[in-house]
Amino acid sequence: MRWSLDNENGLPVASGMYIVHIDMPDENKTKILKLAIVGEQQFLENF
């Protein structure tokens, strides 16, 4: 699955550390990842 780094409102997520929880019931596995996002500085017209 791809993620465009936008939140559910279509706005870019903030830079920071994120914990990703991936549940794969078909394979009976769970994965927990640490994800660092460093975004470029943006000036949003709408927020």
Image (cartoon, rainbow, N blue to C red):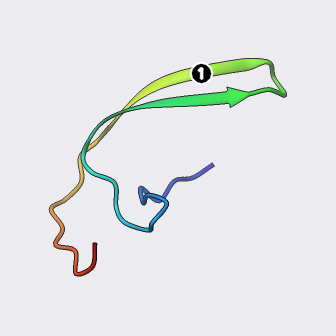
When the figure is inspected, residue 11 is found, relative to residue 36, above or below; the finding is below
Q: Residue pushed farthest bottom?
A: 45
Residue 36: horizontal and vertical position, in percent? 31, 36
Left or right? Give the position of 17 relative to 2.
left
Q: Residue at x 84, y 28 (%)?
A: 26
User: Does 17 appear above or below 30?
Assistant: below
x, y (%) of residue 11? 37, 66
Q: State the image quarter where residue 22 is shown.
A: top right
With respect to residue 5, does 34 lie above or below?
above
Numbered-mark total: 1
SS under mark 1: strand
Residue at 51 percent of width and 53 percent of height: 3
The residue at which mark 1 appears reads as 31
Q: Is residue 2 above or below residue 28?
A: below
Neighbor class of circle 1 (other Cα within 10 Å; few <14, some 14-19, many 20+) is few
Does residue 2 appear left or right of residue 9 in this picture?
A: right
Q: Residue at the right extreme?
A: 26
| Residue 40 coordinates in the image, percent (x, y) | 19, 59
Report which quarter residue 43 is drawn in.
Answer: bottom left
On screen, residue 47 versus residue 24, left or right, reads left
Residue most extreme to the front: 47
Q: Is residue 9 left or right of residue 45?
A: right
Q: Residue at x 34, y 54 (%)?
A: 13
Which image quadrant for residue 25? top right
Tell me the residue at 57%/52% (across/down).
Answer: 2
Work out which quarter of the rendered image holds the C terminus and state it: bottom left
Residue 31: x and y in percent read 59, 21
**Three-letter amino acid code at the position of disc 1:** Lys
